[in-house]
Image (tube, rainbow, N blue to C red):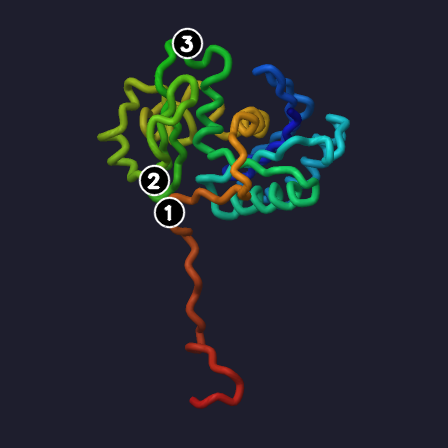
Amino acid sequence: MKILALDTALDACSAAVVETEGGEARILAERCEPMVRGHAEALMPMVQAVMEEAGLAFAALDRIGVTVGPGTFTGVRIGLAAARGLALAADRPAVGVTSLEAIAANAACGDANPQGRPILAAIDARRGELYVQRFSAALDPLDEPRAMALEDARETLPFDTSLPVGTGAVLLTGEAGPVAPLPHAALVARRAALKVLSGKPPAPLYLRAPDAKPQASLFGPLRPAGGAA
């Protein structure tokens, strides 16, 4: 199975083409750049670069994977829009992977978790909150993704018996986690290969309302031209 995967949900932009077969995965091409903004401008050139390096046409892909959040509202929308557009153009299914699962996958590779502890994925959601979810060492979800106040998370989450990873790990423990704290498209592709197709396009996972609020008009409510005062 050949998969193009995208991630723009947090403070990086990445794209990768991965081929999976018999439980093994081979990275054909990958790009990753840290960035707080500019994902919209960086993503499609990155996609073109990895497809050219992999030597594949979009019609040769079997599916397209993308992180669906939680993350920044703009970043999540950019990735989803790109994945849906590419999937429609190539007539291939798009598959969503949560940012929390993708981050937990960083700890399931190599010897990052030799004791096989549960993995606690935690993303700094700002405003004194975390996005969190626990996974087994084999990446089976142990609970649902949720937003939590940092103080509540410190008091209730079993981070001392788990392996904390992600940008929120340092907020819980005072130390950075043992693996990369952000999703990477190559691991998004591997997780996307395991998903059962639903027939529906991937949907965003926000977990909380957007920070930005519509501004009220400086001149009061708008009225149709010629309408009554």
The percent coordinates of residue 84 (x first, y second) are: 60, 44
Find the distance from the CA under tag 1 to the CA under tag 3.
Answer: 34 Å
Badge 1: few (under 14), some or many (20 or more) residues near its Cα, within 10 Å?
few
Q: Residue at x 73, y 31 (%)?
A: 60
Badge 2: few (under 14), some or many (20 or more) residues near its Cα, within 10 Å?
some
Q: Residue at x 74, y 27 (%)?
A: 53
Q: Are marks 1 and 2 in contact (CB under 8 Å)?
A: yes
Q: Residue at x 70, y 44 (%)?
A: 89
- Could you tell me which secondary element the residue under label 1 belongs to? loop
Identify the amino acid type marked 1. Answer: Arg
The percent coordinates of residue 126 (x first, y second) are: 38, 41
Question: Which of 45/28 is in front?
Answer: 28
Identify the amino acid type marked 3. Answer: Pro
Find the distance from the CA under tag 2 to the CA under tag 3.
Answer: 28 Å
Mark 1 or mark 2: which comes first in sequence? 2
Q: Is residue 140 above or below residue 153?
A: above
Query: Residue under circle 2?
Result: 147
Query: Residue under circle 1?
Result: 208
Mark 2 or mark 3: which comes first in sequence? 3
Picture quadrant where residue 174 is located: top left
Q: Is residue 112 left or right of residue 17?
A: left
Badge 3: few (under 14), some or many (20 or more) residues near its Cα, within 10 Å?
few
* Quarter of the picture holding the N terminus: top right
Q: Which mark is residue 193?
A: none
The percent coordinates of residue 131 (x first, y second) are: 37, 36
Q: Is residue 95 left or right of residue 165?
A: right
Query: Residue under circle 3?
Result: 114
